[in-house]
Structures are given as structure tokens and as C-alpha cells.
Image: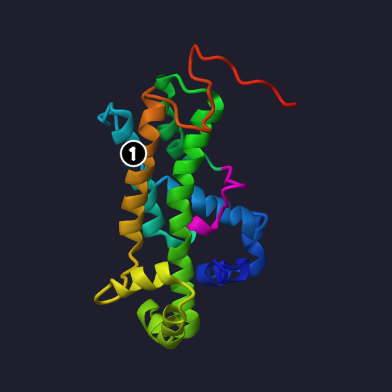
Amino acid sequence: MPALTMRGVAARLGVAAMSTYRYVPSKEDLVLHMADAAFGEASYGADAPGDWRARVELGARTLWGLYRKHPWLAQTGSLTRPLPVHNLMVHGKWVLSALDAHGLGPTTLFGIHVLLYSHVQGLAVHLEREAHAQAATGQTEDEWMDGRTPVLRELVESGRFPAFAKVVGAFEHGYDLRLDALFELGLKTLLDGLTPLVEGRPAIAGCEGTRSGSRPSPGPR
């Protein structure tokens, strides 16, 4: 994304730099169009699973696949300032519709949607960052870590972090950080934890008590 400029786009198209502004007024608008096009590359068919969990898993994996295909995409919007583009809303609608029939209050329903999205997007931001770091340093992730082995060994052997030392010492060949595996682990863990809430089992402490028929929470004090 840092390499994207209106002048660079014009050069790739073989046109004058200012002529691109006839179509998009700024780089920010260009990025919105790019993001909308990328999010629109995947959709959901009529033969989708009926189970809420299977539908949510499909939505999460679809988004993860798009971020995998376009590593820059996760950098285009933050959780607090989401992109106002049609095709991202399609993915949000998919998850919300999967959860909507379970009697959840609107705050809880949307909070679950945001939480699931943050898991996918939060991991995906590291795809572009790692690619940028490799380009800037000329080192792969493993090469970068190898260069910091003395520092890590000093931390382990300092005696100040026994839990860290115990876990790291248990890895025979070091820890292989794989984002795909973390995505799957996080998705399963989130859905396991959310299942009692979504399916109306005993409430989880701290969650909003606004299921259908439940007593509304008091207003601000």
C-alpha cells in the first residue's frame, strides 16, 4: 500500500498523472474502489449451510481467503474506522444473518460480529507487514529470528521469565508461527466460547443480558 500513488497508477496506465483524477478524486477514493472490488471476488451461494456455526465458519474462512489473496486488503481499514464499501457489507450481512434468529440483543449480536471480524482482520494485517519487512530488510522471518537468537537466549536464561523459558524450552526445533494455523485455532476457540451464548445455554458472565424475553439492563447512571 505505501507504494501505491496516483502518479504511479497513471504511469502504469500510460496516461498523464492528472488524468486519473477525472475518475477518482484522491488516493483514498482509489483504495476504496480497490477494496470494494477485492471483497467482491467472493460471495455466498443459495446452497449455504443452515447451521449458524457452519455459516459463520464459512464467512470467516471466505474473508481469510480474500486477505490471503490480497495481503494489502487488511491494511485499508481499521476495526474502529471500517470501510464504507458495499462488498464488505456483504460479508458482514452473512455473519449477522447467521446469528440473527437466536434471540440475541442487538448489542450482543453486533458485538459478536465485530469480535469475529477482528480475529480475521487482526491476523491478516501481518501478511502485508511481513511482506513489507522482508522487502525492507532482505531477510525472511526465519532469518530475522535467527539474528535475534542471542537476545532471546539471554531472556530465557535470565531467570526472570520462568513460564516463558519453560514453554520455549519445550520446543525441540523452535516455534513455527503459522498464521493459517492461528486463524483456525482462534476461530474454533471463539466459536466454542460463543456457542453457549448463541444457543441460549447458561449465560457467560459479563455478557449482555438482552436475549428475547430477558429483563433489559438498566440505563446509564
Q: Residue at x 51, y 70 (%)?
A: 12
Q: Is residue 181 in view?
A: yes
Could you tell me which secondary element the residue under label 1 belongs to? helix
In reply to whether residue 207 is colored magenta, the answer given is no
Vertical arrangement, residue 77 with respect to residue 6, above or below: above
Tag 1: amino acid: Asp
Q: Is residue 23 in view?
A: no
Residue 103, percent from left and from top = 44, 19
Q: Quadrant of the N terminus?
A: bottom right
Q: Quadrant of residue 219?
A: top right
Residue 18, percent from left and from top = 67, 65
Question: 106 or 153, which lies in front?
Answer: 153
Vertical arrangement, residue 48 with respect to residue 62, above or below: above
Residue 49, percent from left and from top = 26, 30
Disc 1 residue crowd, few under 14, some 14–19, many 20+, Cα 10 Å = few
* Outermost residue to the right: 221
In reply to whether residue 83 is colored magenta, the answer given is yes
Question: 189 or 9, which lies in front?
Answer: 189
Q: Residue at x 32, y 58 (%)?
A: 180
Question: 63 or 183, which lies in front?
Answer: 183
Q: Which residue is mark 1?
A: 192
Q: Quadrant of residue 203?
A: top left
46 on left or right of 158: left
Residue 38, percent from left and from top = 44, 51
Vertical arrangement, residue 216 with respect to residue 187, above or below: above
Q: Quadrant of the C terminus?
A: top right
Give the extent of the magenta segment: 73-84
Q: Residue at x 72, y 26 (%)?
A: 220
Q: Main secondary structure of the magenta part?
A: loop
